[in-house]
Amino acid sequence: MAKTGVFEGDAAMAAKATELKKELQRLVRAIVEDEDFDFSVQAVDRAAQTLFELKELKKKRPVSLKLSQSSACPEEFRCPISKEIMRDPVIVATGQTYDRPFIQRWLKAGHRTCPQTQQVLSHTLLTPNLLIREMISQWCKTHGIQLPDPVQYSNEDGLTEADREHFLSLLEKMSSTPTDQKEAARELRLLTKRIPSFRQLFGESLDAITQLLKPLSQGRSQSDVSPDLQEDLITTLLNLSIHDNNKKFVAETPTVIPLLMDALRSGTIETRSNAAAALFTLSALDSNKALIGKSGALKPLIDLLEEGQPLAMKDVASAIFNLCILHENKARAVRDGAVRVILKKITNRMHVDELLAILAVLSSNPTGVEEMGDLGAVPCLLGIIRESACARNKENSIAILHTICFNDRTKWKEMREEEKTYGTISQLTQNGTSRAKRKANGILERLNRGVHLTHTA
């Protein structure tokens, strides 16, 4: 059956309204007729709640049911997606007009084309169509239909048109005076932290990230940039990267990764830590892992890891681990000195959990394994197995040892001496994780056989 101008959901809402009215009638009758004061108080409370629900239902249904009884709505007043009269008409990049909630839903689903023309949108900024809105308003008045005040209308994410205008004004300040830049950067940092839906606004314009970072990319040296301004902008990038829909376009904005790398080398420790955290968050996408790795970001991450700033260590380690999941990045990390830095930190018992996990990932790289053996990884890892109470650390350690020993037969002497003195490997075959037991048994079998091992892949 064809629709005649009734908004989707009106029938269900009308049925709900009827049900609430009947319930209200029953409660009022009970209050009037019953002499038990206690029961009446309960009924009054329920009646008040029912009235509240009726009021809320009215708010959710701003268009009168009279619409179905009035003359047909002009086609240009209907959203091409919903086929319903538009409450908040907006214009997309192709010039077509849609009702804001429906076009937002389309864009959120990952579409970057105009539903009507199928043209690729040059940006996803939505511009209010004030002319159509006024025409709809006049038509509704003529036909006795009440629409919500557009100024008060907010979308399903809780953002109003005023929010969008404020957002654009803050971005404009990034091209203004240093004072304006600092104020706007601080506010954007707070907004993107406190209001998750505010993060998606950056996805509505292809230039938003570029505008945000303009103070950092105007050709000035980092020493000319206020440390506070740099910290606020880098932290805003971190906040944005948390939003899943933002990860791809944030990383692919040309200025982002170079500026994050600059931040790793300079600025406050919070700036450096947040830059590492942003790279970690962005690297959740495999395409971003490749992009970040090719950019050379592993080197400044490893340098910061070596520096050992306590506040940054976990974020840096997390970023390196995530990036090294990609095969090509393992070779880059090894080339940039990751094995040496990580072994030094583990030997000093610093952040052993996180760094052992990275070393385990790098143990699938032949050059990395060779370097581990040369830098004394075997006694270090055996010490971890003896001392640690963490099953995962024991597992990672024996897995790395298994790889080293089966790639370098000169290391078997150390393993035999360890087993003879402490029984470390035997103990792990009894109380390790299933993977640890498997690796330990593999080593123990060779040790017990006493076979002169040849190089084995």
Image (cartoon, grey):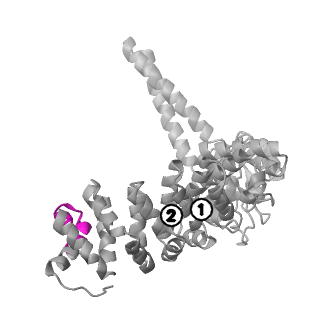
Q: Is residue 244 left or right of residue 177?
A: left
Q: Is residue 403 left or right of residue 413?
A: right
Mark 2 or 1, nearer chain start: 1
Q: Residue 121: where, in percent of width, then height?
A: 73, 67
Picture residue at 40% right of the left edge, 74% below the top: 374
Region in magenta: 424-441
- Residues 423 and 46: in front is 423
Quadrant of the snapshot with the C terminus: bottom left
Q: Measured along the vertical axis of the image, is residue 180 above or below residue 126?
A: above
Picture residue at 37% right of the left edge, 14% below the top: 38
Res. 145 image quadrant: top right
Circle 2 Cα neighbour tier, 10 Å, few/some/many (<14 / 14–19 / ≥20): many
Q: Is residue 109 visible?
A: no
Q: Is residue 34 visible?
A: yes
Amino acid at the residue labelled 2: Ile
Q: Mark 2 against mark 1, which lies toward the viewer? A: 2
Helix, strand or loop under label 2: helix
Q: Residue 77: where, in percent of width, then height?
A: 76, 55
Quadrant of the snapshot with the N terminus: bottom right
Report the Cα–Cα distance between label 2 and label 1. 17 Å
Read off the residue under disc 2: 320
Res. 141 image quadrant: top right
Read off the residue under disc 1: 247
